Amino acid sequence: MKNDNRKIVLVGTGFVGMSFAYALLNQTACDELVLIDVDTQKAEGEAMDLNHGVAFSASHMKIYAGGYSDCKDADIVAICAGVAQKPGETRIDLLQRNTAVFHSIIAPVVESGFRGIFLIATNPVDIMAHVTQRLSGFPASRVIGTGTTLDSARLRYMLGSYLEVDPRNVHAYVMGEHGDSEFVPWSQAMVGTKPVLTIVEESPQSYSVKDLEEISEDVKNAAQKIIAAKKSTYYGIGMSMVRIVKAVFGDEKSILTVSTLLQGEYGQADVYIGVPCIVSRDGVCGVLEVLLTKKELEKFKLSANLLQDAFGGIRFEQ
């Protein structure tokens, strides 16, 4: 991957895609950004709008609407495109339609000569990341789903507020599916170097395990609450995507709960799921296998099984 010109191609200029693009510009996270959308006029308009703010940014980004041929020398292709679920449509039907959309995207990206990293945000993100890996034939390390990065950020924010500490000093993760079967492994949650469960045990007058479980549920249901209030969520996931991008471009080897293909970790294989991963210039260069309790492993297995069943129901063109 080149270091002199950090190039990203974004496919899908909806709310999530443009929140990602806007955050890229404000955080000066890349040097060149190409926007691709089935609605080419919208992509052109979004590029113009962003360019008009460059003078107010510390960035010197080159931003323009383009096509799949622009992927050839890109470092990252980020995909936010997809279709919405229709009334009465099953999850498998939705997955089948999104797989068709992804086939129309992945094929020309690969044909362009692209050899970088795919970053997937389209929901259900774990399955769509797996679909991307299957369709592209890329090593799993170079196909990353946003996973539970946003869920983990929500957890750190809520837990920080509850314990009255800076969320940046809260070390806790949400694992599993980015969805209803996700869970918080409280056995691994820390503030600084002190276990959260120990803090709760030492101060029963102020904290309780019941409160922790309520925080876990609030994290899981956060998206639904936001959607009920403003129809969709996009700022948080856009910033999560930028965090992953910066870990890649900076070769940080940061630990982020992205969605990756397990190959025996946690007793699971052939499933994309959110786990703490080491993210570097090469993509996911390792899975950090944290020590889960028996009950937590059971929750993880349930989540993995749900994802495997859903992915197994997708028909791929031969």
Image: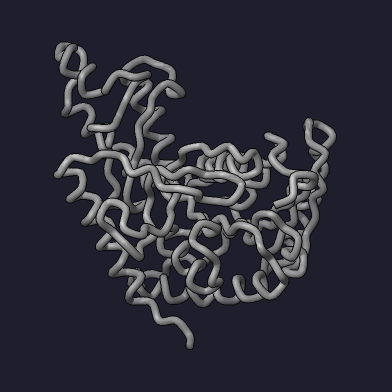
Residue 176's spot in the image, x, y percent? 32, 50
Residue 55's spot in the image, x, y percent? 84, 34
Q: How is the image coloured?
A: one colour
Residue 118's spot in the image, x, y percent? 58, 59
Q: Is 31 drawn above or below residue 131 in the view shown?
A: above
| Viewer-side residue, 142 vs 80 | 142
Q: Residue at x 80, y 43 (%)?
A: 61
Q: Residue at x 32, y 62 (%)?
A: 269
Q: Is 157 drawn above or below residue 25 in the view shown?
A: above
| Viewer-side residue, 87 vs 209 | 209
Q: Is residue 26 left or right of residue 231?
A: right
Q: Quadrant of residue 187?
A: top left
Q: Is residue 3 visible?
A: yes
Q: Quadrant of residue 159?
A: top left
Residue 88's spot in the image, x, y percent? 33, 72
Q: Is residue 162 left or right of residue 58?
A: left
Q: Is residue 132 left or right of residue 209?
A: right
How many numbered discs sit on the rendered protein?
0
Q: Residue at x 38, y 50 (%)?
A: 274
Residue that lies at the very extreme toward the bottom in this rendered image = 318
Q: Is residue 19 visible?
A: no
Q: Residue at x 43, y 53 (%)?
A: 259
